[in-house]
Image: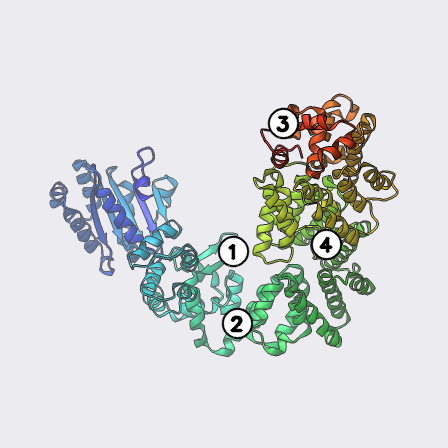
């Protein structure tokens, strides 16, 4: 980078400034660059001057500059400098003239320039750099920028600057340095070391020295901090040496929080000029940096911070507790409940911890911080851990991690100590009561006793506290309970109110949760269009809020994959697989459901279809023992049923119909899956009698998309009976229902006969024709080609093959002779390039004909 900047002929930089804190490897980097430069064919002359304290004298520094030039190894340069007098007041001008007359490229490196502070020396150097000859490049290296007036050079575009960020070691460079110590780390350990050192060269070097021959590198890296002897000694000698007692005290006190503002630094230190101290530290590259996302906040390098935290005990235990409480009050005032709690726990003050918990239970639970709070509270005094507010948060943490038994027992304990919730008056008690009953609903969703928990919550009167954040949270839990009870209309109304409160309270994550749950309601109804709109907004918020690891975000993403699946989006399987992987990493109970959904959505692309169907069955999103909204079970039924039958698993298909009856009760979804089985077995009359109540509206489907599937079953029955007019009418009704939602999947699931009817009926669907054309185009070209090879009679016979009935039985049903059936079978085998019935079924499935 330095070479490119200083040798760029289009935009040459006469002066380079390389400033970074001690141990950043700046001198080594410049030395490596110089060696690289000298190895080139047109190498310039390089003169190196390392500044010492004695160089803060004009005559001394002049002599040192001339000596560096004459000792550079260039005899012509030595001769050009021979006649110059170091005591001359105009040495800069005469040296510039001599170099100009020499006409050769010369690079002057001034190392440790931060030691220069004499006014005359600095003024002389500024003047020389401003008028230095064009063949000279000056490189100034130091821990911080010396007090030179460089603004004019910057404005003129003649100064190039490298900072600590530019010089930070990359992972590859760190691995190379560690290799010098015979240390080779696996990627995870190297990443952990990079986090601790942030590419600081000295930190990496010290780590390499410590790791050399160490039996457990992972543990050492996890414990590698500023209080390790080697690191501490380096920090004391190279970073902290020379600091005043007042500055050391400032550093210790401001190390209490992970980051701080000027105002917080003033409160922690009592220093009225905290801003000046921070400016001085910044200017001197004192391992301090601004936080990129929040430039008013500062933080120390992790190794320096851990050293200071280890040293802070010297100011006294009582004073450290006071500083922790000061930080806790500061973060509490500015609404950062989690950091406030952490500092309160660090102080060990029970009263402060309890008071803070009473005030912040709501934001901590709503913000999804249960697990973090649980970890923090393990360090709190026992009395604080036993407080009802703490137990409430621990119940939330257990729910967040999917530990339903722990959440249940914690809430039961709170019931026995209900009087303990009266912390700061009636209003506080009501907040806790609402939170407790809301968490009980969440627990009940995992155990199945939803109705009782919902009645308890509703009896408290949630949604009218006047606090929009609290009302949004309580109503969200009520809406989720109603969804799992199958009361979709009620759930939508309650969730709408929850969403309004969440937007009013300006709580983005609460908005995401509400939108995701409303999307689940729409999925439960089979409303693809609305679900897709809700999902888009929810996922956008989740990404903006960096909440992509939140289980609710991933479940919302799973709903997105279903929307894509129903609309034949090829990304459906990928999105589902990503969601399943994330839920598996989070160890959530829904990971198995997600795996089953991902396998189902990826069947079309599977090279081993039967194995994939087996995976769907193993992790069935419908048969799962997990509590699940009945509509979501229902919406996936037809696709799973067709998958089972296409794989020849008639037993699984019967099991699915039985389970649907148990889970869904008297809805139209159960007759649908039964009718699909009857149709597959060519029991046409039974299939028609089974599906008729659904078509007549006597039985409503929980999922609207299942009514589309029901009309397609009717169309298939009519086709099998050669009732073309009825088949066309049923297909038209299916198109009418599917068109507003752009739903394509049911038409693909029900087999090639529907596709062929679509083709034969081209131009006969009136205003639905554009959608019908889009549907025809959605079928893979290979399917159409295979279908075109077979005659209508052959296609009709092909559907019978998986039933494994004899040729005589098929002939009787089709009212043709056995010889005719055998002739058509030979035609099917020939066109599919097979020689057996089993191979014909497999080839037909591969080509999408079954």
Q: In the picture provided, is 60 more to the left or to the right than 199?
A: left
Question: Label 1: few (<14), some or many (≥20) within 10 Å?
Answer: few
Q: Mark 2 points at which residue?
A: 323
- In terms of sequence position, does the residue under pointer 4 or pointer 1 come before the other? 1
Residue at 13% from the left image edge and 41% from the top image edge? 80
Q: How far apart are marks 4 and 2 (CA)?
A: 49 Å
What x and y, as percent, mark residue 271? 48, 67
Circle nearer the viewer, 3 or 4: 3
Circle nearer the viewer, 3 or 1: 3
Task: Classify mark 2: helix, strand or loop.
Answer: helix
| CB within 8 Å, label 3 to label 1 | no
- In terms of sequence position, does the residue under pointer 3 or pointer 1 come before the other? 1
Task: Classify mark 1: helix, strand or loop.
Answer: strand
Q: Name the residue under label 3.
A: 786
| CB within 8 Å, label 2 to label 1 | no
Residue at 67% from the left image edge and 60% from the top image edge? 366
Circle nearer the viewer, 4 or 2: 4
Q: Distance between the residues labelled 3 and 4?
A: 40 Å
Q: Name the residue under label 4.
A: 628
């Amino acid at each position: 980078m330095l070479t490119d900047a200083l040798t760029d002929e289009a935009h040459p930089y006469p002066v380079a400034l390389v400033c970074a804190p001690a141990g950043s490897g700046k001198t080594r980097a410049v030395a490596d660059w110089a060696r690289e430069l000298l190895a080139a064919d047109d190498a310039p002359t390089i003169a190196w001057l390392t500044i010492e304290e004695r160089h803060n004298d004009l005559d001394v520094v002049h002599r040192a500059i001339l000596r560096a030039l004459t000792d550079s190894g260039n005899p012509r340069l030595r001769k050009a400098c021979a006649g110059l007098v170091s005591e001359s007041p105009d040495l800069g001008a005469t040296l510039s003239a001599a170099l100009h007359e020499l006409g050769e490229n010369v690079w002057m490196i001034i190392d440790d320039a931060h030691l220069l502070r004499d006014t005359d020396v600095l003024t002389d150097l500024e003047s020389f750099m401003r008028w230095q000859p064009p063949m000279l490049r000056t490189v100034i290296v130091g821990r911080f920028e010396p007090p030179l007036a460089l603004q004019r050079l910057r404005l003129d575009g003649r100064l190039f600057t490298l900072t600590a960020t530019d010089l930070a070691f990359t992972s590859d460079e760190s691995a190379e340095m560690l290799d010098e110590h015979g240390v080779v780390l696996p990627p995870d350990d190297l990443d952990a070391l990079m986090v601790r050192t942030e590419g600081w060269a000295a930190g990496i070097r010290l780590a390499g020295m410590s790791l050399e021959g160490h039996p457990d590198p992972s543990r050492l890296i996890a414990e590698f901090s500023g209080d390790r002897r080697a690191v501490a000694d380096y920090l004391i000698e190279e970073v902290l040496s020379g600091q005043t007692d007042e500055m050391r005290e400032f550093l210790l006190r401001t190390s209490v929080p992970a980051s701080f503002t000027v105002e917080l630094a003033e409160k922690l230190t009592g220093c009225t000029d905290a801003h000046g101290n921070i400016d001085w530290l910044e200017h001197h590259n004192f391992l301090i940096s601004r936080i990129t996302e929040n430039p008013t906040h500062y933080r120390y390098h992790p190794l320096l911070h851990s050293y200071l935290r280890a040293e802070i005990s010297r100011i006294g235990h009582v004073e450290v507790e006071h500083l922790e409480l000061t930080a806790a009050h500061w973060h509490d005032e500015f609404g950062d409940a989690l950091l406030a709690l952490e500092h309160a726990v660090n102080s060990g003050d029970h009263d402060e911890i309890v008071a803070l918990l009473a005030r912040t239970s709501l934001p901590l639970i709503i913000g999804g911080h249960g697990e973090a709070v649980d970890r923090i509270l393990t360090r709190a005094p026992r009395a604080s851990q036993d407080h009802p507010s703490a137990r409430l948060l621990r119940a939330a943490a257990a729910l967040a991690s999917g530990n339903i038994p722990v959440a249940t027992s914690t809430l039961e304990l709170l019931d026995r100590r209900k009087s303990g919730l009266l912390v700061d008056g009636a209003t506080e008690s009501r907040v806790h009561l609402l939170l407790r009953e809301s968490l009980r609903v969440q627990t009940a969703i995992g155990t199945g006793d939803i109705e009782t928990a919902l009645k308890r919550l509703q009896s408290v009167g949630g949604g009218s506290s006047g606090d929009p954040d609290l009302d949004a949270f309580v109503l969200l839990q009520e809406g989720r309970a109603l969804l799992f009870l199958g009361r979709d209309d009620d759930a939508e109304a309650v969730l709408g109110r929850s969403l309004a409160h969440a937007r009013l309270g300006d709580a983005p994550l609460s908005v995401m949760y509400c939108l995701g749950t409303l999307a689940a309601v729409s999925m439960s109804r089979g409303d693809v269009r609305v679900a897709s709109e809700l999902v888009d907004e929810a996922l956008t918020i989740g990404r903006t809020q960096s909440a992509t690891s939140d289980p609710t975000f991933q479940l919302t993403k799973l709903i997105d994959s279903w929307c894509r699946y129903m609309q034949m989006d090829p990304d459906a399987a990928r999105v589902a697989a990503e969601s399943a992987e994330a839920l598996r990493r989070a160890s959530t109970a829904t990971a198995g459901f997600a795996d089953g959904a991902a396998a189902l959505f990826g069947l079309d692309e599977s090279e081993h279809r039967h194995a994939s169907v087996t995976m769907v069955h193993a992790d069935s999103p419908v048969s799962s023992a997990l509590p699940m909204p009945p509509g979501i079970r229902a919406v996936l039924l037809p696709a799973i049923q067709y998958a089972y039958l296409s794989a020849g698993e008639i037993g699984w298909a019967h099991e699915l119909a039985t389970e649907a009856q148990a889970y869904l009760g008297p809805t139209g979804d159960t007759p649908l899956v039964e009718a699909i089985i009857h149709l597959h077995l060519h029991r046409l009359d039974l299939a028609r009698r089974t599906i008729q109540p659904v078509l007549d509206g006597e039985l409503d489907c929980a999922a609207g998309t299942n009514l589309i599937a029901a009309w397609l079953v009717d169309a298939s029955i009519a086709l099998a009976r050669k009732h073309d007019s009825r088949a066309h009418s049923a297909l038209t009704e299916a198109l009418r229902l599917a068109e507003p939602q752009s739903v394509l999947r049911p038409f693909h699931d029900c087999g090639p006969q529907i596709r062929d009817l679509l083709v034969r009926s081209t131009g006969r669907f009136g205003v639905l024709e554009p959608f019908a054309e889009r549907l025809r185009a959605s079928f893979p070209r290979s399917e159409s080609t295979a279908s075109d090879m077979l005659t209508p009679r052959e296609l009709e016979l092909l559907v019978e093959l998986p039933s494994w009935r004899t040729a005589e039985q098929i002939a009787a049903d089709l009212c043709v002779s056995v010889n005719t059936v055998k002739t058509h079978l030979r035609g099917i085998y020939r066109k599919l390039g097979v020689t057996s019935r089993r191979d014909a079924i497999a080839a037909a499935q591969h080509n999408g004909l079954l």
